[in-house]
Amino acid sequence: MTGFLIQLGGPLQSWGEHSAFNDRDTVAHPTRSGLIGMIASALGISRDEAVTDPAGDGEPTPFSRLGQLRFTVRHDRPGVRMRDFHTVGGGLPAHRTVPTAKGGRRGAGQTTIVSERHYLADAVFTVAVTAPGAPDAAGLTTACARALAAPHWPLHLGRRSCPPGAALVLAARVPDPVTELLARVPLARPRPGTPHHPAPDADPEETVSVRFTADTPFPPGFPAPASSRAAVTTLNDDPVRLRPRDRAYRSRPSYTTSCRLPAHLCKGYGPEYLDALLAYAQPPATEGTDA
């Protein structure tokens, strides 16, 4: 099951799932629509082209192919929820106040709109991206990883005010990216019971609980209880159209579980974590091979 690995970590993230009008929500992890939209932006698929079947003939489009992607999200750090208070339209002349649904403008004393926007601060998610069942799964995931490494348009984590961190694409071609999440990719958190540096005699058998979410059932070999193979909820985030004034989504099941991972994967914060991530992404050449 070839795929690639990305890491979503920035000062702020916001993954809206049922935002309406002046209350812009975020769920606790990246949404399917947010991830597909980010990859579409990297590939240069415009908003007008972000339609699964524009002609109604069932022919696949560059955007509809992204619907074959599947995302397994590891919650390295859940982050802290923040609410930002906005006002829109205040102090403007009459011809520039907030438009109304009837095509006019708001009158005096009604020009200011209050808006609240929700964010995740200091959150980090590592995502395994695969395309099981796609006709050319390896080609699709390779093209997506390549685009994310050199995007056509600037990328953001749910909102344009939320740029991604320095490490986005961790590995472009991985035979089994879900297993990499379980066994090899460093966790962006300190080891329990220690400061940033674990003690030399730390128990090698120690484990930590890590949460995972996915848009398909976890595979049989996944180290989680059998009950996690049933969906815990549904999310309205499977994109059908992402046009500027015409957005539509399908509901899809969401799977969640927690499992125990080796504590030695915890590599702290800041420079020490980035060093561990670099060592994972660029392992030293083995003896007898070219560097």
Image: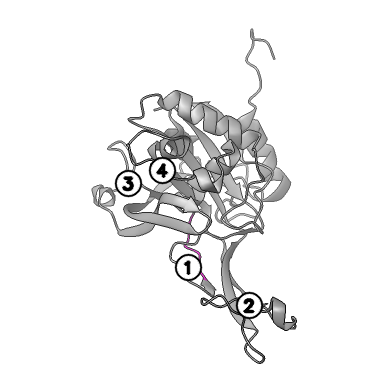
Q: Which residue matches tag 1? A: 19
Q: Residue 261, position in %: x, y?
A: 45, 44
Which residue corresponds to the image point at 66% horizontal and 51% vertical from the top-left? 269
Q: Is residue 188 above or below residue 182?
A: below
Which residue corresponds to the image point at 36% horizontal and 29% vertical from the top-left? 134
Cα–Cα gap, marks 1 and 2? 20 Å
- Position of 14 with respect to 224 (left or right) is right
Magenta-highlighted residues: 24-29
* Residue type pointed to by label 2: Val
Is disc 2 in contact with disc 4, using a CB cutoff of under 8 Å? no
Secondary structure under badge 1? loop
Q: Residue 54 carries which label?
A: 4
Q: Residue 13, position in %: x, y?
A: 59, 58
Mark in the foreground, 1 or 4? 4
Mark in the foreground, 1 or 3? 1
* Residue type pointed to by label 1: Ser
Q: Which residue matches tag 2? A: 98
- Looking at the image, how many numbered discs can be counted on the residues? 4
Q: Which residue matches tag 3? A: 224
Cα–Cα gap, marks 3 and 2? 51 Å
Q: Quadrant where the C terminus lies?
A: top right
Q: How crowded is mark 2: few (under 14 residues within 10 Å), some or many (20 or more)?
A: some
Mark in the foreground, 3 or 4? 4
Classified by dominant secondary structure, the portion drawn in magenta counts as: loop
* Residue type pointed to by label 4: Pro
Residue in front for this viewpoint, 168 or 236: 236
Q: How crowded is mark 1: few (under 14 residues within 10 Å), some or many (20 or more)?
A: few
* Mark with earlier residue (1, 2): 1
